[in-house]
Image: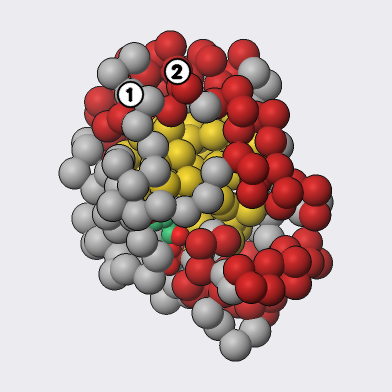
């Protein structure tokens, strides 16, 4: 049961002037996926990078790319993100009036289909499409920026979602937590039912990022009680 969970460092907090070094650190580390935050300045009040940069990153990175699309009408660009190397693509529930169709598009292109939920969006809204989803990304901050404070109501959302998925027979659903994850709260998040932890600042702003990743990876929530 050890190390069942995945660690996905978020590149948003990296030093982009030293991008290759950061990516090589990631490759050599205990991390599982590289989390890439794509922002369009419209769905969220910030702009980051797109498929051109991801394609370049993919040439250096040796592990799966977990692409978090914080953009309106993501279906316009999903084929290009898959072509750029995305292994997991999460679209936002709040940006997708045709979510069922969008999820099928992602899977048909060969990627894992993810849905991200803003902090105010309840998990029960995913019930009717749950089997079309490989991963739910629960935002534990408001999307748009790294380094924000973790929102405590996330624990309850994790428990509800895990219960709903188990109750429906979708035990393989991955639950990813994105925002404000640290070694302080990671174990409790895993105990609540999460199994993918995104960590930006707590990894890349640490004095030893590879050690910070190992610490998150080493956690074994099942040996302790709350
Ligand atoms: C926020 C992004 C996160 C961000 C997390 O919109 O989705 O992935 O990088 O950063 P930290 O871990 O610093 O909260
Ligand atoms: Zn993210």
**As displayed, is residue 4 above or below residue 79?**
below
Check if mark 2's residue and mark 1's residue have beta carbons within 8 Å.
yes
In the image, which disc is placed on residue 127?
Answer: none
Q: Please identify the quarter of the rendering in which residue 207 is found.
A: bottom right
Q: Please identify the quarter of the rendering in which residue 211 is found.
A: bottom right
Q: Assess mark 2: CB under 8 A from ligand 2?
A: no
Q: Position of residue 84 (x, y in %)?
A: 69, 36
**As displayed, is residue 131 above or below residue 111?**
above
Residue at 51% x, 62% y: name it: 12
Q: Position of residue 13 (x, y in %)?
A: 51, 68
Q: Quadrant of ligand 1?
A: bottom left
**Residue, disc 1:** 96
| Left or right of 80 in this view: 156 | left
Q: Position of residue 53 (x, y in %)?
A: 64, 49
Residue at 60% x, 23% y: name it: 79
Residue 82 versus residue 112: which sits nearer the camera? Answer: 82
Residue at 60% x, 33% y: name it: 81
- Asked if residue 99 can be seen in this view, the reply is yes
Q: Position of residue 205 (x, y in %)?
A: 52, 79
Mark 2 or mark 1: which comes first in sequence?
1
């Amino acid at each position: 049961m050890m190390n069942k969970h995945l660690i996905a460092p978020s590149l948003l907090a990296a030093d982009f002037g030293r991008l290759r070094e950061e990516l090589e650190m990631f490759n050599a580390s205990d991390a599982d996926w590289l989390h890439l935050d794509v922002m369009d300045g419209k769905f969220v009040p910030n702009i980051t990078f797109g498929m051109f940069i991801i394609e370049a990153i993919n040439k250096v990175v040796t592990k799966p790319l977990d692409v978090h699309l914080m953009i309106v009408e993501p279906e316009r660009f999903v084929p290009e993100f898959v072509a750029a190397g995305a292994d997991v693509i999460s679209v936002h529930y709040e940006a997708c009036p045709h979510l069922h169709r969008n999820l099928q598009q992602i899977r048909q292109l060969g990627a894992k289909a993810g849905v991200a939920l803003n902090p105010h969006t309840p998990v029960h809204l995913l019930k009717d499409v749950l089997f079309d989803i490989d991963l739910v990304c629960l935002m534990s901050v408001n999307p748009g920026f790294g380094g924000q404070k973790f929102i405590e109501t996330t624990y309850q959302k994790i428990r509800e979602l895990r219960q709903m998925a188990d109750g429906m027979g979708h035990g393989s659903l991955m639950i990813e937590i994105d925002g404000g994850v640290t070694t302080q709260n990671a174990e409790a998040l895993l105990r609540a039912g999460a199994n993918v932890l995104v960590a930006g600042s707590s990894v890349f702003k640490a004095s030893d990022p590879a050690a910070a990743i190992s610490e998150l990876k080493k956690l074994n929530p099942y040996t302790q009680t709350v």
